[in-house]
Image: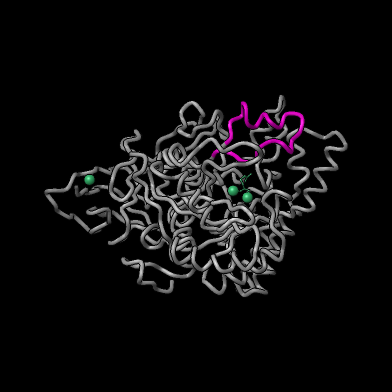
C-alpha cells in the first residue's frame, strides 16, 4: 500500500522545507511539490515536522547485569522506542570469554527473535583478544554485518577488559574498517575507591557517584584517545558526562583524530543531587558513569553545539525500582546500573535543545538520527529522508505540552527517572519502512516486524545492494 504524507515540514540534518513524500515498497519513492497519486493513502501532517526516524545507538534490552536482567526486552523496549520517535536501535551484544563471538550473536538473535517492532542492529563486546577472536572479527563484520566493537574500561572482574585488549581491538578495527566503542572509566581506580567506601561504612546510593569521580572518566577517555592515535584507528566514546572527558575528546579531534563522542539525555537534564534522595530513592538514579555536578550540563550542550560530541544515545538499561534497584539497599555496589530512557531521548533533546534555542532543528536531526546512521554504517538507508531511503518517518507535533510520567510511558519499568518533567513536542505517528508502528499516538505495530540490519563498515555507505559500498 502506497502512502503519501502531505502538508508537513520536512526536516533533515541539512534542510527544512515543505514538500510531499510518496512512500512505496518500504521506501521513500518521491519527495516533491504537489505530488499526485490516487492510489496512495493520504497522511495529513499539517502542523507537524516530518523527521527521519530516530536512531538510538545505545540500548541494553534483556541484558543480564548485577545478578538480574533488564526489564525491557526487544518487544517492550522497541514499542517504547517507537512511541518516542525512534525507529532503529543498536543494542549491545555481550560476549563470554572463551566462547566464539558468533555464539553470542546467536544468543542475541534468540532474544530479539519475533519481538522487535522496529529495525535493530548490534554492537559486539570484545572482552578478550586471542587468535580465535582475531580470526572471528572479520567474519563477524562480513557475515553478520556487525561493524562496531565495544570495550569496557570499567566494571572490574565483570565486563572490564585490559589496555592490551583495547589496543589490539583498535588495531584490528583499523585493519577491517570497524569502529571501536569504549565505556571510558578507570575500573581499577573505581574498584579501590568502592572497597574503601564500603570499609568506611558508606553504603548509600550517592557513594556510587563519589567513588567514580569525573577524573576517572577523563583519564580513561584520554587513554583511549591516545591508544587510538597510536593505532591510527577510530573511536566512539559512549555516554560522555563531564568536562574532563569532553576536553579529552575535543583535544583529540583538534589533532584530526577520528574520535567521536555520545552523550545521553539524563546527563543533560539531571544532576548528582538526585542520588541523594532519601529512603533509597537515590537508587533510581544509579548508572555509570554517574550523574554529575549540574555545571556539566552546559558543558555538554556546548560540546554538542560545537560538534565535539555528535550523538545522543539513551543508554536504555531499565531496572525496576522495586525488586531490582532495591537489591542494593545497604550496599550501593549491588544496585544494578542503568536507567530507562529509550522513550524520552528524542523528545527531551527536542524540548530542551530546540525549544530552548540551544541547538537548531537540523542539528537536532543530526544528533538524534543522521550522525549515528553515518558512524554505524546505516546511512543513507536510515538517518535521512531522501528517495531510496527506508520510509522510517516521524510526524512530530512541536507544540504539544506534556509531562513525562511512569503512568503514561510505555517502558516496562515501574518508575521514570524524569517523572514530572515538562516537555514540549510529541511524536504523533511513526512509520517503520512505510508501515505504521504508532498511529495517532496509539501503538499499531507488530512484534517481529522489525528486521535485523547488517551494517556497512566504518566510513562506508551501502547504496541499494549490500555489495555496493561507497566511501562516505
Ligand atoms: O549504568 C549503565 N550505563 N548500565 C549499562 C551498561 C553501560 O555501562 O553502558
Ligand atoms: Zn501497506
Ligand atoms: Zn557503559
Ligand atoms: Zn550502556
Q: Residue furthest right?
A: 200
Residue sitting at x 38%, y 67%: 462
Residue 425 percent across, percent down from the top left: 42, 40
Side of 126 where 424 appears, left or right? left
Residue 58 percent across, percent down from the top left: 53, 50
Residue sitting at x 33%, y 39%: 445
Q: Quadrant of the C terminus?
A: bottom left
Magenta residues (range): 319-340
Residue 169 percent across, percent down from the top left: 62, 66
Q: Nearer the viewer, residue 187 or 349?
A: 187
Q: Nearer the viewer, residue 115 or 286?
A: 115
Assign the magenta stretch its main secondary structure.
loop
The verdict on residue 128 being magenta is no
Side of 293 where 144 appears, left or right? left
Side of 12 where 258 appears, left or right? right
| Any part of residue 24 in sight | yes
Amino acid at each position: 500500500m502506497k502512502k503519501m504524507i502531505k502538508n508537513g515540514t520536512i526536516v533533515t540534518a541539512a534542510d527544512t522545507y515543505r514538500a510531499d513524500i510518496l512512500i512505496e515498497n518500504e521506501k521513500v519513492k518521491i519527495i516533491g511539490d504537489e505530488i499526485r497519486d490516487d492510489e496512495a493513502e493520504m497522511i495529513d501532517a499539517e502542523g507537524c515536522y516530518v523527521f527521519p526516524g530516530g536512531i538510538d545507538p545505545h540500548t541494553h534490552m534483556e541484558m543480564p547485569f548485577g545478578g538480574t536482567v533488564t526489564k525491557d526486552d526487544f518487544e517492550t523496549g522497541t514499542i517504547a522506542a517507537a512511541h518516542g520517535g525512534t525507529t532503529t536501535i543498536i543494542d549491545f551484544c555481550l560476549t563470554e570469554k572463551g566462547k566464539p563471538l558468533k555464539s553470542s550473536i546467536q544468543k542475541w538473535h534468540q532474544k530479539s527473535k519475533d519481538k522487535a517492532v522496529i529495525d535493530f542492529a548490534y554492537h559486539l563486546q570484545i572482552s578478550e583478544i586471542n587468535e580465535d577472536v582475531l580470526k572471528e572479527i572479520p567474519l563477524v563484520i562480513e557475515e553478520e554485518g556487525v561493524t562496531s566493537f565495544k570495550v569496557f574500561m570499567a566494571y572490574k572482574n565483570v565486563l572490564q577488559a585490559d589496555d592490551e585488549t583495547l589496543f589490539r581491538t583498535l588495531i584490528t578495527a583499523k585493519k577491517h574498517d570497524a569502529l571501536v566503542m569504549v565505556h571510558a572509566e578507570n575500573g581499577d581506580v573505581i574498584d579501590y575507591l568502592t572497597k574503601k567506601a564500603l570499609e568506611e561504612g558508606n553504603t548509600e546510593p550517592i557513594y556510587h557517584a563519589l567513588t567514580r569521580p569525573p577524573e576517572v572518566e577523563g583519564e580513561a577517555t584520554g587513554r583511549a584517545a591516545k591508544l587510538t592515535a597510536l593505532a591510527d584507528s577510530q573511536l566512539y566514546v559512549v555516554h560522555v558526562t563531564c568536562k574532563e572527558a569532553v576536553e579529552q575528546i575535543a583535544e583529540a579531534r583538534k589533532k584530526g583524530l577520528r574520535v567521536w563522542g555520545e552523550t545521553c539525555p539524563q546527563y543533560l537534564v539531571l544532576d548528582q543531587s538526585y542520588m541523594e534522595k532519601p529512603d533509597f530513592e537515590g537508587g533510581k538514579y544509579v548508572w555509570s558513569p554517574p550523574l554529575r555536578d549540574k555545571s556539566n550540563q552546559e558543558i555538554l550542550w556546548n560540546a554538542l553545539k560545537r560538534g565535539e560530541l555528535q550523538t545522543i544515545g539513551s543508554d536504555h538499561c531499565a531496572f525496576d525500582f522495586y525488586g531490582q534497584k532495591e537489591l542494593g539497599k545497604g550496599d550501593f555496589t549491588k544496585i544494578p546500573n542503568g536507567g530507562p530512557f529509550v522513550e524520552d531521548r528524542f523528545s527531551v533533546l527536542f524540548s530542551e535543545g530546540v525549544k530552548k534555542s540551544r541547538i537548531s532543528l537540523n542539528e537536532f536531526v543530526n544528533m538524534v538520527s543522521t550522525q549515528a546512521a553515518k558512524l554505524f554504517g546505516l546511512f543513507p538507508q536510515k538517518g535521512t529522508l531522501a528517495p531510496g531511503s527506508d520510509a522510517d518517518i516521524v510526524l512530530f507535533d512541536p507544540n504539544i505540552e506534556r509531562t513525562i510520567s511512569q503512568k503514561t510511558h510505555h517502558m516496562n519499568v515501574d518508575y521514570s527517572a524524569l517523572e514530572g518533567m515538562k516537555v514540549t513536542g510529541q511524536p504523533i505517528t511513526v512509520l517503520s519502512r512505510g508501515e505504521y508502528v504508532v498511529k495517532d499516538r496509539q501503538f499499531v505495530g507488530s512484534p517481529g516486524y522489525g528486521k535485523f540490519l547488517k551494517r556497512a563498515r566504518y566510513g562506508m555507505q551501502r547504496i541499494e545492494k549490500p555489495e555496493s559500498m561507497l566511501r562516505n
